[in-house]
Image (cartoon, coloured by chain):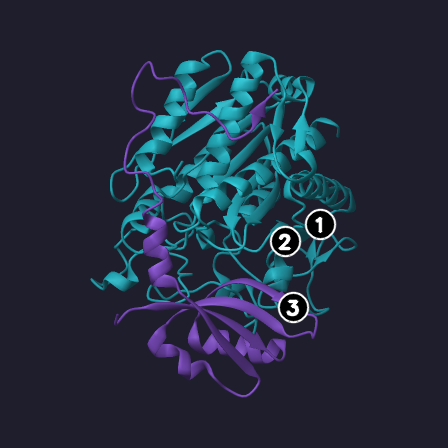
């Protein structure tokens, strides 16, 4: 698929390398933290054709998932009904147990 | 079970308002979205204008792809209202029995505060994410796209009036995560002006019209974090003049060094960390997931966020709102059974937070 988005893990040796990369490529990132070696680790959602551009000294890239495919699978888990629109059927109920 | 679609969020809110008329009210927001949707909030409590009771604002699904924020709000509202009517407690099942809130806990929350849920701030974006591009983050306003479909939309959590004009307020080298480019691939376009978007105007309207709001929790994903102010720079508690409203510090913010740190009073910081830790403990009790508590800046520097906007309003009004952001889970859209587990733990965290507020 031409516009396929991959979910990748980026590990950067230090903050400067990481921020320089973000400023240059304007990546769609989430879940930033430091690992036990002090590296900056984040997940990013990147077009597959762009991934090779990110591979540079001080940067490790690991492709972990076809995010486009996963997203389409999750869309199947969205209700296609309107489960709470009928009068008399009672309200939506929460996920906690009442006791 | 399945994720709620946009129509179901609205009908779920209305089903609760119809069933529990004595304990909640629907609030219709004044600004329709670009695609013409009307947004609704639900207040749980007796009277929002009762100044003796604090109100807590919860906003969900500001970012389109972070679907579970709406479910966290709607299912918590449903739990509270049903338990209040039945006179029961609520148990969020998980490891080691989960977390139990007694009938007295539930009564004290509903009787002593107002809980204002705005479950789906960005319904146009959510609908697009749920039916077309699952990773869509912004709203669906095409005004600044120049006809390019990839450039549609504004990142609503960069559109609030908190240091929105980052080129004016931040150091030129600050790696602030916002953009003036509608086509920014990081999906962080801030919009053409602060509060340019109907969705953020609706949040502002809720806050403007309900001065009893004292706390705001903005529900996002992901990273398993509880964030508190500030997001523009590191916090400091010693120099009240070094603050976001002081223009002598323009172009110095966002580097994390000693030239600028954002002021938070020691009293506020004590309350903030106490409540954030209560929320952490409530979350942990369900599935033993250990959410880190940190300032927004510790994640990365930002401008225009809802959490910081709420908290910054005390510089222009007499009303102080303590703002938080939850980053739930480990992915934007976990499979529904996993999302249901997350809903239970976050709802437990929020109820524990409410009990913390009532004990202040």
Q: Mark 2 points at which residue?
A: B230
Q: What element carries label 2?
A: loop
Residue B49 appears in view? no
Compared across the picture, whether B26 is left or right of B106 comes to left
Q: Where is residue B320 in the image (x, y as percent from the top left)?
A: 63, 37
Please tell me which residue is depicted at 44% across the width and 35% down the height of the picture. B205
The answer to the question of whether label 2 and label 1 lie on touching residues, with beta carbons closer than 8 A, is yes
Compared across the picture, whether B145 is left or right of B202 comes to left
Q: Where is residue B71 in the image (x, y as percent from the top left)?
A: 46, 37
Name the quarter where the N terminus of chain B is drawn. Answer: top left
Q: What element carries label 1?
A: loop
**Label 1 marks which chain's residue?**
B
Please tell me which residue is depicted at 44% across the width and 39% down the height of the picture. B70
Please tell me which of labels 2 and 1 falls first in the chain.
2
Of the pair B65 and B151, the residue shown nearer to us: B65
Please tell me which residue is depicted at 68% across the width and 60% down the height of the picture. B234
Rendered position, B339 above or below B302:
above
Rendered position, B187 above or below B202:
below
Please tell me which residue is depicted at 51% across the width and 66% down the height of the picture. A43
Instruction: Name the quadrant containing residue A85.
Output: top left
Report the Cα–Cα distance between label 2 and label 1. Answer: 8 Å
Name the quarter where the C terminus of chain B is drawn. Answer: top right
Around disc 1, counting alpha carbons within 10 Å, would you say few (fewer than 14), some (14 to 19), or many (20 or more)? many
**Label 3 marks which chain's residue?**
A
Q: Mark 1 points at which residue?
A: B264
Report the Cα–Cα distance between label 3 and label 2. Answer: 20 Å
Q: Mark 3 points at which residue?
A: A34
Chain coloured purple in this rendering: A
Chain coloured cyan in this rendering: B
């Amino acid at each position: 698929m031409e516009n396929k988005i991959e979910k990748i893990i980026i590990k950067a040796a230090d903050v400067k390398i990481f921020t320089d990369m973000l400023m240059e490529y304007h990546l769609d990132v989430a879940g930033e933290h430091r690992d036990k070696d002090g590296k900056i680790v984040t997940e990013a959602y990147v077009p597959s054709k762009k991934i090779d551009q990110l591979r540079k000294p001080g940067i490790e890239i690991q492709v972990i998932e076809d995010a486009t495919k996963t997203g389409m699978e999750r869309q199947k888990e969205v209700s296609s009904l309107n489960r709470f629109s009928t009068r008399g059927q009672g309200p939506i109920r929460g996920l906690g147990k009442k006791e | 079970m399945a994720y709620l679609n946009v129509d179901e969020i609205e009908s779920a809110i209305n089903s609760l308002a119809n069933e529990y008329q004595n304990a909640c009210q629907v609030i219709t927001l004044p600004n329709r979205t670009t695609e013409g949707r009307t947004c609704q909030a639900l207040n749980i409590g007796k009277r929002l204008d009762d100044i003796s009771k604090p109100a807590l604002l919860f906003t969900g699904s500001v970012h389109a792809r972070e679907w579970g924020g709406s479910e966290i709000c709607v299912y918590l509202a449903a739990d509270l209202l049903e338990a209040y009517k039945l006179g029961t407690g609520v148990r969020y099942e998980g490891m080691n029995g989960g977390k139990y809130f007694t009938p007295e806990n539930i009564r004290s929350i509903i009787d002593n505060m107002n809980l204002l849920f705005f479950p789906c701030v960005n319904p146009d974006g959510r609908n697009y994410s749920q039916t077309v591009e699952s990773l869509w983050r912004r709203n669906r306003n095409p005004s600044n796209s120049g006809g390019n479909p990839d450039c549609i939309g504004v990142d609503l959590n960069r559109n609030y009036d908190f240091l929105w004009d980052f080129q004016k307020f931040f150091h030129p080298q600050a790696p602030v995560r916002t953009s003036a480019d509608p086509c920014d691939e990081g999906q962080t376009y801030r919009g053409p002006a602060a509060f340019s978007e109907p969705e953020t105007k609706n949040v502002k309207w809720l806050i403007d019209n309900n001065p009893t709001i004292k706390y705001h929790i903005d529900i996002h994903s992901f990273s398993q974090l509880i964030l508190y102010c500030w997001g523009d720079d590191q916090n400091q508690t010693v120099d009240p003049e070094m603050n976001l409203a002081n223009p002598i510090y323009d172009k110095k913010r966002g580097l994390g060094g000693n030239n600028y740190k954002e002021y938070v009073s020691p009293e506020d910081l004590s309350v903030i960390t106490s409540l954030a830790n209560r929320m952490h403990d409530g979350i942990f009790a369900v599935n033993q997931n250990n959410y880190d508590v940190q300032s927004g800046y510790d994640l990365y520097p930002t401008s225009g966020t809802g959490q910081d906007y709420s908290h910054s309003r005390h510089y222009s009004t007499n009303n102080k709102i303590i703002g938080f952001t939850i980053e739930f889970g480990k992915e934007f859209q976990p499979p529904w059974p996993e999302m249901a587990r997350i809903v239970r733990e976050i709802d437990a965290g929020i109820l524990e937070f409410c009990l913390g507020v009532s004990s202040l």
